Image (spheres, rainbow, N blue to C red):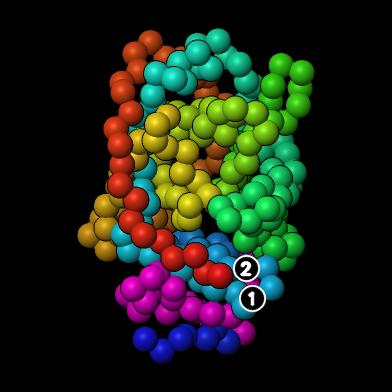
Amino acid sequence: MALIWLAPGADFPSVEQAATNGMLAVGGDYSWQRLHRAYTLGIFPWSNPDDPILWWSPDPRYVLYPEHLRIHRSMRPYINQRRFRVTYDTRFAEVVEACSQSPRQGKDVGTWISTELAQGYTELHRQGFAHSVEVWDAEGHLVGGLYGVAIGRVFCGESMFTRASNASKYGFIHLVKNLIARGYADVLGDSRSVRPQSPSTATDEPPKRKRKPRGPKPVESVTEVPVETPVEVTETEEPEAVESTEPATENPE
């Protein structure tokens, strides 16, 4: 496949042109308009900070249908005892910064979130499309969180961090229950940075191009559905987690 370069102002190519590893295009910028357009089309950025901007649309795509979330019994004490407090959109920039400093597999520190990309997401947040989840301990310390982009009835999780055991998983579970209450159809995890699954949660991963958007609005809709109001997490019955199989994802390094 020939590499597709994005000229200034050029639109993205069809996702059907993505390579087998999911890479679609190179270049462009991290403006909030381009980021919004990318997520509307099912495309996301992922590259090392010093490399050219890379855009991806892998198949299969990691998908969580919110109602299919399975919570392992090991999380029950955290939920029933409400060991953490969860807020939304109160520390967006701080959450993105914490995610950018979180160690990744095979690295001591740092992720794919460059300063320019963080600025793009922050502006997307100001426009009402990017949202953060903050997890606090009893002393009021920010101990976990995640952020993502809401397009139509789909929430695209981008990255998460944790400073206390199971804090990010707690925030993720809280978020999914919030999204269910608000009628969201899918949660997409665009890289390995948002997969708080086995043994605490389990997920589905159908091929992207065989999956039609679900819910009252498709992913192509650009209508914003905010997620700023928390929904209390209460658990009375928690099914066992189901092991899920991840497809190979190539790290763009």
The location of residue 69, given as percent across then percent down, is 36, 32
Does the stretch in magenta take in 148? no
- The answer to whether marks 2 and 1 mark residues whose Cβ atoms lie closer than 8 Å is yes
Q: Residue at x 47, y 38 (%)?
A: 196
Indicate which disc residue 252 carries.
Answer: none
The location of residue 70, given as percent across then percent down, is 35, 29
Q: Is residue 16 above or below residue 181?
A: below
Q: Secondary structure at mark 1?
A: loop
Q: Is residue 121 visible?
A: no
Q: Which residue is mark 1?
A: 51
Q: Residue at x 57, y 14 (%)?
A: 82
Does the stretch in magenta take in 20? yes
Camera-nearest residue between 130 and 52 = 52
The location of residue 118, given as percent across then percent down, is 70, 58
Q: Is residue 177 left or right of residue 143?
A: left
Q: Which residue is mark 2?
A: 48
Which portion, as a residue range, is magenta? 8-34
Numbered circles on residues, count: 2
